[in-house]
Image (cartoon, coloured by chain):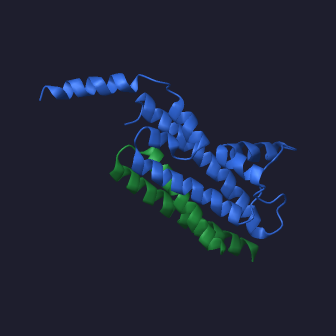
Chain colours: A blue, B green
Amino acid sequence: MGTTPNKIAADQKESSQGFVYLPLIAGWLVPGAGHFLLRKWGRGALLSASILGMFATGLAMQGKLYAGAHDILDVLGLAGDLGNGLLYVVSQLLGLGADQVRVTTADYGTRFIVVAGLLNVIAAVDAHNLRTGRKA
Amino acid sequence: MTHFAAVLLFALFASVVFGITQRETPQKMVRYGIYCFVLFTVSAIALSWAMFWIGR
């Protein structure tokens, strides 16, 4: 009975230690990693599978990876792609993704990749909220 | 892959992330995820029919 308040105090002390932004950065670089760091295995696995699945589906549909920003729409697309963290960097290094949209499904694939990046940012912010105690 | 399959995949992936990140308890996460999935799918079908009738 007496250990419960101690345990809560210990948990609070543990959560206030360390680098607060680590789950945010890890979650951005690798989808789901922020939740894994916080030992939220189930949530992390589902987030990782969803974001990786969406990114891979986008590449399979011959979606385009934005490499530069020539106009405002390219800037927005590049910002979304950068949300994928290391996935984007590795894909660029491996030469994955189409340079230009040539088929109809490639346009959808491009959106899949951008949205995967945006969802990854949402997941990383969620990990940060869990780390700071803003969310249970 | 058909367009409808792409819509379903998009709805599934986005709904999972929305459910987990926007709600706090597992039960609410599942309910919100299903709600988002249905909303994505139904609105895509409704808009498709609307564009079909407008384009005729």
Q: Nearer the viewer, residue B17 or B50?
A: B17
Q: Residue at x 46, y 38 (%)?
A: A37
Please, which residue is most extreme toward the right here? A70
Q: Residue at x 40, y 30 (%)?
A: A133
Horizontal and vertical percent position of residue A119: 58, 48
Above or below, B49 against A109 in this view is: below
Quarter that holds the N terminus of chain B: bottom right
Q: Nearer the viewer, residue A120 or B39?
A: A120
Quarter that holds the C terminus of chain B: bottom right
In this picture, residue A77 sits left or right of residue A17: right
Q: Residue at x 76, y 45 (%)?
A: A78
Q: Nearer the viewer, residue A12 or A78?
A: A12
Above or below, A107 against A87 in this view is: below
Q: Nearer the viewer, residue A97 or B6?
A: A97
| Number of marks drawn | 0
In this picture, residue A77 sits left or right of residue A47: right
Horizontal and vertical percent position of residue A17: 42, 22
Please, which residue is most extreme toward the front here? A94
Above or below, A114 against A56 in this view is: above
Horizontal and vertical percent position of residue A113: 68, 55
Asked whether the viewer can see residue A106, the reply is yes
Asked whether the viewer can see residue B43, the reply is no
In this picture, residue A48 sits left or right of residue B26: right
Horizontal and vertical percent position of residue B21: 47, 45
Q: Residue at x 31, y 28 (%)?
A: A11
Please, which residue is most extreme toward the bottom here? B56
Residue A75: image quadrant is top right
